[in-house]
Image: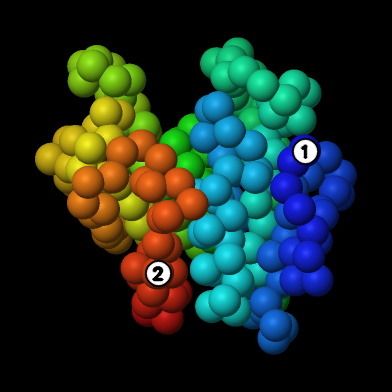
Amino acid sequence: MTGGSTPNVVAFDREGVRGYLHRPAAPAPRGVVLAHGASGDCASPILVATARAFSAACFAALRIDLPYRQRRPKGPPSPATAAQDRAGLKAAVLAMRETVAGDVLMGGHSYGGRQSTMLAAEEPQLAAGLVLLAYPLHPPGKPEQWRFQHFSQIKIPAIFVHGTRDPFGSIDEMRKAIAALPSPAQLIVVEGAGHLLGGDRFDPTALVKAALAGLQG
């Protein structure tokens, strides 16, 4: 596991859930769990920036290493062990629910966000909403290989953040996929951004505002 601890960011290691917990200055009434993309880990700049922004808005924000990344520091996940990654994500959400008294969101970047949507489809009561950064709608150059067949089973609100230059899905394709959701959904478009959404230059302000608005009804 990589990352770094500061007074407000502490290493988290509990019952197989590993990562870093961003603690707000005031007691957090709500939480968010963020998982990384296929080639990343919990120290990915986009996760760090997002966790900091949520923490500043009085969320407890936990960025985690998924089980496949805990087993090996490099390399992509295997479809054969995706269910284990969802189990690890579920364990992180349950750990966060023990940490805060209020709602817990889940999501993450690319693969981490995709596994979050699949988990939400399987267990609709687990989290209060989804935060999805650069959802990998299809492999680059293969728009026929859609990855949103399960969207019709998602019953919780979702916020998507997507760049106009993301090869994993165009904005029009994202809008088509989001229309399959029976629950409320919002698309935040980042002009000129690719799949990393600018990395450490990513500004999560609009995402956090949308999340707060959704939780406040």
Which of the two residues, 53 or 177, is positioned nearer the viewer here? 53
Residue holding disc 1: 1
Residue ID at (58%, 33%): 40
The N terminus, quarter of image: top right
Label drawn at residue 20: none
Q: Quadrant of residue 85?
A: top right
Could you say where residue 76 lies in the image, as x and y percent from the top left? 57, 19
Q: Residue at x 42, y 63 (%)?
A: 204
Residue drawn at point x = 40 percent, y = 69 percent: 205
The spot of residue 113 in percent (x, y) is 47, 41
Say what amino acid the circle numbered 1 marks.
Met
> The disc labelled 2 sits on which kind of residue?
Thr
Residue receiving disc 2 = 205
Question: In x, y percent, where is residue 122?
Answer: 52, 39
**Observer-nearest of 38 and 98:** 38
Taking the spot 58% from the left edge, 43% from the top edge, the residue there is 44
Quarter the C terminus occupies: bottom left
Q: Looking at the image, is mark 2 or mark 1 earlier in the sequence? A: 1
Q: Is residue 125 visible?
A: no
